[in-house]
Image (tube, rainbow, N blue to C red):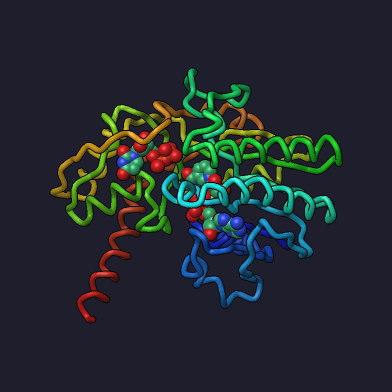
Amino acid sequence: MRVLITGGAGFLGSHLCEQLLKQNHEVICADNFFTGSRRNVLHLLGNPDFDLIRHDVTVALSVEVDQIYNLACPASPIHYQRDPVSTTRTSVVGAVNMLDLARRLHAPILQASTSEIYGDPEISPQSEDYWGRVNPIGPRSCYDEGKRCAETLFFDYRRQYDLQIKIARIFNTYGPRMRIDDGRVVSNFIVQALRNEEITIYGDGKQTRSFCYVDDLIEGFIRLMNSPPNFTGPVNLGKPDEFSVLELAEIVIELTGSRSSIRQLPLPVDDPRQRRPDITLAETKLGWFPQTSLRVGLAHTIAYFDQVLSAERKTTASV
Ligand code: NAD
Ligand code: UDP
């Protein structure tokens, strides 16, 4: 099959490109490099089944493909708040453009949605039938409401045009190829620990998250895309173990053997207090369950950042 991946040069997108190429599909990766990078897919550029195009999803795109994965959107709070208007535009106008393309091609389309749909939830764990508690006018709203509107558009295209849609609600996923300056908690803590710098805990560190390793998530994406046409989701994809941010910091310090101490900084506005997926639906409908423990996934990620940081040190030393 020929597959389009928008946001394919980002963290998750680059792993998806790699995995689909391994499965002998042709991949077209479309990205405007807002947070993604050509470096993430450099190793794929020589592959005749791989195409990379610089493209912004807020502009219509015409390609001939059999499936579309719509991942284009900055995912880290510091990056999606950098240009909030563009974040909403990417989610909403980008969704319309990709849905129109899917409609013309009669192709199934998968949306990378998010646990942010649930906002700061009053129930735990969160299952797909929970409508969420989202502030519509806060600094996170450009992302949360953009993604919520994209879900609405996906369902309206299904109801109105009988389009084959798939919606994955992704919970915090981490792994190699996150940016050093990504700003999300796992990459921040690992980079700080490896540099023996202070680990920045926002608030009291008692807020919780559930962390999924990238390989497991990609497996979930592919299973969802290839599930029966009548299965649309939304379906939660995440690892249902819950850790406080402080616990995560302690594990990272232990695994890196770091001398870092902990520094408390103010909690960002509207930072959700807890987050844990109920993944019964993914288990039942997709036979999917994330296999990688937090410690094993962190070890792979630490090895990756260790390599990136030592390459950076060598470059600085030779200048
Ligand atoms: P990322 O920032 O590494 O990747 C996003 C990619 O989209 C980047 O390559 C960026 O350059 C590209 N992009 C942004 N705006 C674009 C536009 N207008 N046109 C074309 N490309 C554009 O983040 P990620 O973690 O890989 O996230 C990928 C997707 O998964 C996002 O849609 C995100 O909302 C969703 N998601 C991720 C997580 C997670 O924990 N990683 C959780 C929930 C949802
Ligand atoms: N966080 C933190 N220190 C950091 C980065 C993040 O304490 O250096 C906290 C953040 O306040 C949130 C949690 O870690 O409570 C997860 O943040 P992240 O940005 O990774 O993703 P979110 O789930 O908030 O979108």
Residue at horizontal 68 percent and vertical 34 percent from the top:
233
Quarter that holds the C terminus: bottom left
Q: Is 310 rendered above or below residue 296?
A: below
Q: Which quadrant of the figure has residue 269?
A: top left
Q: x%, y% of residue 45? A: 56, 74
Q: Is 49 rendered above or below residue 120?
A: below
Residue at horizontal 17 percent and vertical 53 percent from the top:
196
Residue at the far left: name it. Answer: 259
Q: x%, y% of residue 208? A: 37, 29
Q: x%, y% of residue 215? A: 49, 50
181 sits left or right of 24 in the view: left
Q: x%, y% of residue 54? A: 61, 69
Residue 20 appears in the rendering: yes
301 sits left or right of 240 in the view: left
Q: Is 50 rendered above or below residue 250?
A: below
Q: Nearer the viewer, residue 239 or 114?
A: 114
Quarter that holds the N terminus: bottom right
99 sits left or right of 58 in the view: right
Residue at the far bottom: name it. Answer: 319
Q: Which quadrant of the figure has residue 283?
A: top right
Residue at horizontal 85 percent and vertical 55 percent from the top:
104
Residue 217 appears in the rendering: no
235 sits left or right of 138 in the view: right
